[in-house]
């Protein structure tokens, strides 16, 4: 029977994590970062939040039991964890690491302007509470989110 899975914050001491560090390594094609567990935990929470109104078959802990749904949860979790890793976001610190960015660079007559440090920091910080576009697309394609999410 399909039902909405319980939200992860409704069960004390239960943190659902939808992907493993091996899944993340497979997704990125590289060794999982040292903070992969924290990245996956944060990403899983955001996936759970994004799918809170979705109806799917789940076990007593709220984990999806249908292979296509479980795969979508895993892939969305890995996509978001990979985005956080690439942006050097540290969930344990609650912020992005090393977010300063050059505003302008000039070599001879060529000039390049980068995103401002504040803009770069804000974009990285958003990854702590907003799913990356790729994760949203994965969940949407599986019918697990509305078309207005993200």
Image (cartoon, helix red, strand yellow):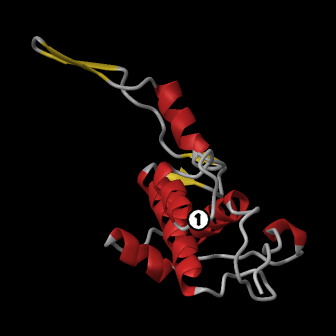
Image coords of residue 57 (percent x, y): 71, 83
* Dot 1 crowding, Cα within 10 Å, few <14, some 14–19, many 20+: some
The residue shown at (89%, 69%) is 10
Residue 112, relative to residue 7: is it above or below? above
The N terminus lies in quadrant: bottom right
Q: Which residue is mark 1?
A: 143
Q: Is residue 65 left or right of residue 6?
A: left
Locate residue 37: give its quadrant: bottom right
Image coords of residue 89 (percent x, y): 53, 51
Q: Secondary structure at mark 1?
A: loop
Residue placed most toward the observer, 136 or 94: 136
Residue 39, relative to residue 64: is it above or below? above
Image coords of residue 78 (percent x, y): 49, 68
The residue shown at (52%, 78%) is 71
Q: Is residue 11 left or right of residue 76?
A: right
Residue placed most toward the observer, 53 or 101: 53
């Amino acid at each position: 029977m399909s039902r909405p899975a319980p939200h992860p914050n409704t069960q004390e001491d239960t943190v659902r994590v939808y992907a493993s560090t091996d899944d993340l390594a497979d997704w990125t094609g590289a060794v999982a970062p040292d903070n992969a567990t924290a990245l996956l935990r944060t990403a899983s929470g955001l996936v759970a939040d994004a799918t809170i109104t979705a109806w799917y078959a789940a076990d007593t802990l709220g984990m999806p039991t249908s292979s296509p749904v479980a795969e979508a949860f895993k892939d969305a979790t890995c996509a978001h964890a990979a985005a956080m890793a690439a942006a050097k976001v540290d969930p344990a610190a609650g912020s992005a690491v090393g977010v300063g960015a050059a505003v302008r660079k000039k070599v001879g007559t060529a000039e390049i302007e980068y995103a401002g440090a504040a803009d770069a920091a804000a974009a990285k910080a958003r990854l702590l509470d907003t799913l990356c576009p790729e994760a949203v697309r994965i969940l949407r394609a599986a019918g697990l989110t509305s078309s207005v999410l993200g």
